[in-house]
Structure formats: structure tokens, C-alpha cells
Amino acid sequence: MVTLKIAFRNIFRQKRRSILTALAMIVGFTLSSVFIGWSDGAYSDIIEMFTKNRIGHIQVHQRGYLDKPSLYKTIDGYESTGETIGGIKGVAAWTPRVYSAGLGSVGAKSTAVQIIGIDAAREVDATRFDKKIIDGSKFSVQPVREAVLGKGLARVLAATVGGEIVLVSQGADGSIANELYEIAGIAESGDDITDRTACYLHIGDAQELLVLEGRCHEIVVIVSNINRVHKITKAIEAGLDDSRLDVAPWQVVAKAFYRAMQADKQGDAIGRIIIMLIVAIGVLNTVLMSVLERTSEYGVLRAVGTKPAQIFWLVICEVLIIALGSIAVGALLGASINHLLSIYGISMPQEFTYGGIKFQTMYAEVNARSLIIPAITVVLAAAVVSLFPALKAARILPARAMRAN
Amino acid sequence: MTNSDVIVTESITKVYAENGVPVEALRGVDLTIRSGEFTALVGPSGSGKTTLLNIISGLDAPTAGKVWLSGKLLSGMSGNDLSDFRRDNIGFIFQAYNLIPVLTVEENVEYIMLLQRVSKAERHRRVAAMLEEVGLKGYANRNPPQLSGGQQQRVAIARAMVSEPAIILADEPTANLDSKTGSDLLEMMNRLNTQTSMTFLFSTHDPMVMERARRLITLKDGKVESDESK
């Protein structure tokens, strides 16, 4: 207790030095907090766009489809599978999809297309498909042989709304599949790669074209809380209890994207380490100076019976008290800045693309991570850098130390 | 060694290496001080007074020789054991007072008892009595920088004596004080020595201290030159 009392009063004794030490910690904490809040906010936006616009949070396929997609690997009776999934707690929406490769022709122009059969009503609930239509009318809920083309595909085929597209593919029964569709709209998903080949059909039309009645290749699931995606994946697996089906969270569905993001995050950690190293060096310098100036005082404390360990804790306590105060101020600053950035964001001078998705404005996020990680880092950095001065003070030879007065 | 011998040194030598050159500060000092003595270690500067005091208190280690305090051999004690031993057996009075600047007068006097885990009520009782004894009643909540040199040295005396150690070691306690204050303090220490069984050992070259000491040990060039009892 007396150690704490002396430590606390020593902080106010050397106000200027304590303020300098605290400033180094506050700046380090705030920078680190904003760094984390900013990158977490950006990654959350990217994940949100990537999953909700495109792949969903969880996907269900026939076993092996993800590794080697095939027209024949279908989910039979998907409606009942979907209904089971929809009844699981945490599932916000589900939608079936049919995929096939094909050839699309508009007039004299032809190109490879990806035929994507979607349930228009469910797709709106799940992936806000209606928001992607940038030209033309809304996709019909009933199959009326309409197609919506990706923006890039429309450009390649010089297709316009109201025109027609001929699709040629292969039916699941081995027949040649070909049909004429009216172009009802042009869609922009924010993903250039998809938009260059995507040709959306009503799922009923796609099933008829590909001879896949009552079947789909994929069920996309949207959950209400993305942080619970793994738990909900397990719940779906348990709920379906079907060994012929694979249930995979987005991290498995988009492995490459997920790994790239993790690698980026590791890069961010290096940035944080550099910030904290600068802070640590600043703190080490002030603590060393303080110990050096008080050598004689430590000598007196040792002379009157204070144990080396008590001197050690005295130095550590002083630094930790400053660290705790700095964390409180830094948390207030960091959370405030992150809050402002989460509302107003920062517009990039140029639009950039991540995972094929375009971004213009980046928003931060206020979360526990952006406060806990800097707090742990500041406390650890302060404790580690004060170890050496604390040991130096504890190992002081009283007689020699008092001569330093 | 008898039961009444509180400080015994045997062939103490201390060699410092000054810029790589060995300097002999003490050269075989044999000393025996009995309980309740009021002794002054005298001698010119560099004679080894402070070095001997530091070695006796375990603040410094001798190059050779042995020290017994209250029958305990200091050499071989660990850092923690030495701290505990000093805390419980030795009171220090320094030339520069060496109070803890961030603690009040009361807290400075109380500090050693806090280390000893004396109960709060007992600490307060003893601190109040001690401050009254040294004439600082009413100064309990002052900080050391608010006190004069004489008052600070009184606090140091109170701190040294409050836990009733067997030995009080005072290194030039009057050197920074004017003669009137120094004389008053010496009178006070003399009185406390008479009232208690505490043993006082001073290092000094102040004639006032020599005058009041009942035993004078003179050091010269690191050796005991004379040892006179009055």
C-alpha cells in the first residue's frame, strides 16, 4: 500500500516528465485504436459487400461441389431443405441458385456467359438483388423468359434493355439447351469480374433450360449476425443432418479472399507494433531518467529496510499508474475518433477495388478490439520497458546509491 | 563476544578500485561496541568513518573481515535478509536527512513500521509520541521541503528511533546544521540514549559531538588510531 502511495505521489512530483510519458502512451494508444477501428471498419465493409452482395454468409451444396462444380451435383428438393434452413435460429434469409456455363449471343456478337438462375423474390431479401439493377425494370417474380445481364456482359454484347439474348448450354439430360430471352435489365453488382459474364435468369427458366426441374446447385444463406456464422453453420449442419450436403461458411467458400484478408490484417499488426515500439522507446527513456535521478532516494529506501522487490514494484507501479491513466484518456480519444469516422468516413481520392468489389468511402468501426488490443499493448509495452529500470533500481547498492546524492 | 556487545567487527578491510587503482579505505579494523553506548567515530576526511559505518550497517560489504550486529553475522546474509535485519535492528540518521520527499512528516516516521506491518493504531500512537519527543508536534502533515534543515533532521531522528532499534547509526548528523540546532539535536539524542537502551554510533568531525560522546574512536588512514572512553 505504501509502495502505491509513494508511486502515485512520485507521478505528481515530476509533472512534466509524467505528462510526457503519458502523452507518448496516449498518442500510441489513440493511433493504435484508430488503426484497428479503421481497418476493422474497412474489412467489415468489404466482408459485408462481398458476402451480402455475392456469396452470402453460408452456402449449402451437394458434397464436393465447391471443389469441383458440376451441372449434375444438385440439391434435390431444395425447397424443403431451404425451409429447414429458414427455421434455424439466426438465419435471416435463404435463396437457391442454379449455375451453368453457356454461350450468349446478341445479334452478331457472342461471348461466354455464366448462367445464374435465381429466385427473384428470395434474392431480393437475401442479397438486395433489386438494388443491383441499374437499367430496365425489376426482374419478374414469375418465369417469363427474361434475362438480366451484368453490366460488363451487356457492354461486350452491345446489349440493351428490351433486346434479346440467345443462350446455348448443355441440359442435365445431355441435350443441347438453347432459348431466347428478353433482356429485362442490366445489373451492376460492384464486382467487375462477375458483371463481365453474369446472365441472370429466373430460376424456373434456368431449370427448364438446363433440365433441372426441382433442383438447384447452391443455397445461399444470410445470417442476422455475421460474427455467429460458424455457430449457425454448425446448427444448419445439425438441422439438415444430410451427409450428401456440404454446409460451408463464407471463409471456406471464398478461401482465397479470406486468406488475402488475413494476410492484410497481419500487415496491419506490424504497423501497430511499430507504433508501440516508438512509444516504448519514449517511455523507456523517461523511466530511465527518472530512476537515474532518484538513485539516492532508492538507496535511502533500501537502507531503512525496503526490500529489492518493493523497490522493483515501486518503479513498475509508477509506470503502470501512468499507463492506466493514459489508457483511459486514449480510449476516450480513440473511441471518439472511430465514432466520428464511422459516421462520416473518409472518401478516397480514387475508387479502389478489393476482392473485385469497388469502394469509394471507408468507414471506421467502434468495437471492443480497438480498445482492448491497444490497452493490452500499452500495459505490456510499459511493463516491459520499465523492467530494466526497475531491476536497476532494485539492485542498487545502498551505500553507493546514497553517494549519488 | 559477550551478550552486551551489539557491534563487533573483526579485521575489516575495504579496498575500492578508483579508476582501476586499488585504494585501501579500511585496513583491519577491530571494534567492539556495547549496548547503550554513545560513541563517536572521529577522524579526518578520508579516514574511513563513513565506509566503516556503511559496512557495520550492511549497506556495503567489506573486502575482508566479519561484522556481527546483535550477535548476528552479516556476511552471507541475502539482500532480503539484510533489508529485514536493517529494518528491525538499525536506525539511520544521515547528514543530508534523506527523508522521502513525497511522504509527509508523519508518513516518513511511520514508514519503517509499515514495512514491519505494525498495526495502524500502534503506528499512530508511536508516531505521535515520537513527534512530540523531537518537538515536532503539529508538523505531522507537512512535507519535508516545507521544513528547515534542523526540523528535517529531527524527523530523521524520529524515523530512526520510532521502531526502537538496537542500534542508531548517524553519519555526520550535525554537518549541515548551524551550531545551535546541532547542539539541541545532540542534547536530544543524548537524552533519548539515556532514556532507552539504544546504542548510538556517530561518524563525525564535529567537536560538539566529540564533546558529548562518552567514547571516542579515532580512525586514521583506515585504522583505529585510538579508542578512549570518558
Image (cartoon, rainbow, N blue to C red):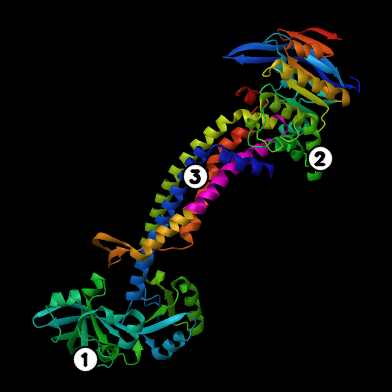
Residue A269 against residue A306 in the figure, above or below: below
* Element at label 2: helix
- Percent across and percent down for residue A148 are 22, 83
Do callouts 2 and 3 point to residues on the same chain? Answer: no
User: Which sits in the foreground, A88 or A376?
Assistant: A376
In contact (CB < 8 Å): disc 1 and disc 3: no
Between marks 1 and 3, how big is the CA–CA gap?
69 Å
Q: 10 Å neighbourhood of mark 3: few (<14), some, or many (≥20)?
A: many
Q: Which residues are magenta?
A: A303-329
Q: Chain of mark 2?
A: B
Q: Callout 2, which amino acid?
A: Arg
Between marks 2 and 3, how big is the CA–CA gap?
40 Å
Left or right side of B104 for B9: right
Q: Residue at x 58, y 42 (%)?
A: A318
Q: Quadrant of the C terminus of chain A?
A: top right
Whether residue A31 appears in magenta in the rendering, the answer is no
Whether residue A323 appears in magenta in the rendering, the answer is yes
Residue B178 occupies quadrant: top right
Q: Chain of mark 1?
A: A
- Disc 1 or disc 3, which is closer to the eye? 3
Do callouts 1 and 3 point to residues on the same chain? Answer: yes
According to the picture, the residue beneath numbered tag 2 turns out to be B125
Q: Quadrant of the N terminus of chain A?
A: top right
Left or right side of A109 for A286: right
Q: Residue at x 68, y 37 (%)?
A: B104
Q: Chain of mark 3?
A: A
- Percent across and percent down for residue A291 are 57, 33
